[in-house]
Amino acid sequence: MKNIFYKSLFWIVGVLISISLIIFLYLFAFYFNFFGALENSGSNIKNSYPDQLVQRKIQAQIEVSNRDTQILFGDTHVHSTYSTDAFLWSLPNSQGEGPHLMADACDYARFCSAIDFWVMTDHAEASTPRKWGETIKAVQNCNKVNENKNIKDLFSFVGFEWTQISPNKEDHFGHKNVIFLETDNNLLPGVPFGAAGYSSDNFRDNSNLSTVRQNMLGSAVVDFSNRQRYADFLGFVEEILDHPDCDLKDPDPRNCYRSVVTPKDLFEVLNTVESDSIVIPHGNTWGYYTPSESSWDKQLSELHDPDRQISIEIFSGHGNSEEYRSWSASQTVDSVMTCPKPSENYLPSCWRAGEIVYERCINSGLEENICLTKSEQAKVNYIEGGQFGHWAVTGVEPEEWLNSGQCSDCFVPAFNMRPKGSVQYALALRKFSEGKEFQFDFGFIASSDNHRSKPGTGYKAIDRLLTTEANGAATPFVRSQFFPYEEKQIDSRKVVISEINTPSELTMYEAERQSSFFTTGGLAAVHVETRSKEGIWSGFKNKETYATSGPQILLWFDLITTSETYPMGSKVDLSKNPVFEVKAVGSYKQKPGCPEFGLTKDESLRLEKICGGECFNPSDERRNITRIEVIKITPQNFNDEPVDDLIQDVWKVFKCKPSQNGCKIRFSDRDFQKNGRDSVYYVRAIEEPSLRVNGDNLRCDYDENGNCIKVNICHGSYLTDKRDDCVTPSEERAWSSPIYVNQI
């Protein structure tokens, strides 16, 4: 009997040891990434958008334009899961749905959003020679569908994003997309050019690998059914780290990573590439990564290339970068950075930090003078914390910050908006040095900045977790790991009072509040002489471009003289008062579902997944244009002239009568000659309201004085139902490129 017992015990122990050994070997193999697979670019559908639908788009414009040119719509800013942030957001623990390949972007642009052109712009800092080769191949394959077509439905371009960041406002230049005319490997660089410094250090730091392994291993254990996806992310990271920095003198850096420090360096290295290129800055008001007092001023120098950096992204799925405001998230006086007081339509987050600490301190029974001191210290901690300032008060739920840090009277503003990064501020600047005059003269475009291979997401307010960048913890456990906080026990109540050191080493952003600011993207519109790749490029070069907040609004903006008509984007010398003409036609209201594409069953099933069953599907009815707004900017006449009075928004407003043929107006600046100042003019054409994802951002409840007293955050995490698209009515719009009028 005793022998049977010992034999059974030895058997059980042996089984347990074997199981433990198997588990250990599996965890060991996972940690050192024996399982991860690398993504390729995928395969797109080999059929084009039906000819009759292309002809319908062309004919619909002819009926209302009376012009020889066409307007083509596109998206110049698209990411696949070749970008680090896109891959992270695709993971199941972030409510992701898995890989988003570049071939998916081709099919989405062609069939779902039915746009005319798109650009693949994954982050250069996450690229490798293999991935760059796959990017070029994906664009070439997308264009091959058109090879034998008389009327081409879609034009695809190669590009990348130069993702520059610095916590120091003097060294922060912001993100820029680079687009190439050519798609031939021999005419393109061997690798994209990343942003050296803060961005590259974070993307490519080998010391982070052990942390990534631990996080992915933990995720795989907790979420075992999705373990392969976490292993794939390990492979993604290791591929990046396997490519060291290039020797900058290497003429063919195809097995390493190449980066440059400043915009000047970027422009110079692009001059060595055979293909022509365009550089488009974007997101300059987005406070997620932009220092609070960052400004365009420092780039009005050799850091700007007026021949290459010719367009600016005025709107994207990350919000609006158009509008200037005189307030700031911080203010520096005599080299000391302090917290500004609240102003109309703006509550600084540093100030709110003080309010939170004061309220909690008083509620805990401490004396008012102590609470006031702690409140002031919280404001200081917030300012000193820079991008991590919200950690000045720990244990705070996102809702407690109310609408602090946000522009409450802007159209779909960027999160934690930085006004001196706005387009209006840039256009008001001039610099005079050694007899030379420097000025930004951008053309306007918009895009999606979608990270799920979905170009042109603004056609319908659907699928928030796919058509916007909304993402977050899939479970309470994941959230507890992503958003830890410290607590102090005071009077038997869990309250937090700011007594921590400057939180500069903490690494969490305001990810949950930010989710309410992710929206569907805009479109770049270009006037073209010919429906071709060269026609699109020429339109960009001439700055005959405009931006929309998503719908395919038609817009023309011209300066009229007795002898000539100058389109948007023009520079004109005048001695007389300028006369302008605007015509805008609203976008088509959309029908549910998708048109008939004549595809196979397998192709239709593929599109059902990629498009979510909803495509650009226009009815016969257009939305009405309700008004035309004119913005006038008079650039500085001397260095450091205050800009607040130079930006007139709105300068003129013209109401429009409802009409399916749109709205047409003519106006003049009768003060131009008298004022004696060069001037910049552009227009906004605004449609009747329609639904937009996160059109109202934090969805405040207001008191009788107009103060936000409660927010209803649209979470990217499990805290908001996946089926809730958080839609609100929004006045969608189109922004013309400016016309620059110099007085002679």
Image: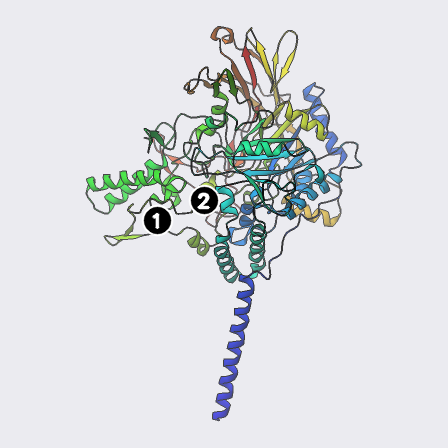
Write down the residue under mark 2: 511
Name the foreground residue: 247 vs 458: 247
- Rendered image coloring scheme: rainbow
Earlier in the chain: of badge 2 and badge 1, it is 1
Left or right of 210? Residue 375 is left
Name the foreground residue: 399 vs 269: 269
Q: Residue 30 carries which label?
A: none
* Residue 264 in which image quadrant: top right
Circle 1 SS class: loop
Residue 384 in picture, x, y percent from top left: 34, 39
Residue 449 in picture, x, y percent from top left: 56, 38
Residue 655 vertical placement versus 374 (above, below): above
Name the foreground residue: 733 vs 216: 216
Quadrant location of the C terminus in the rendered image: top right
Disc 2 residue type (three-letter): Ala
Write down the residue under mark 1: 395
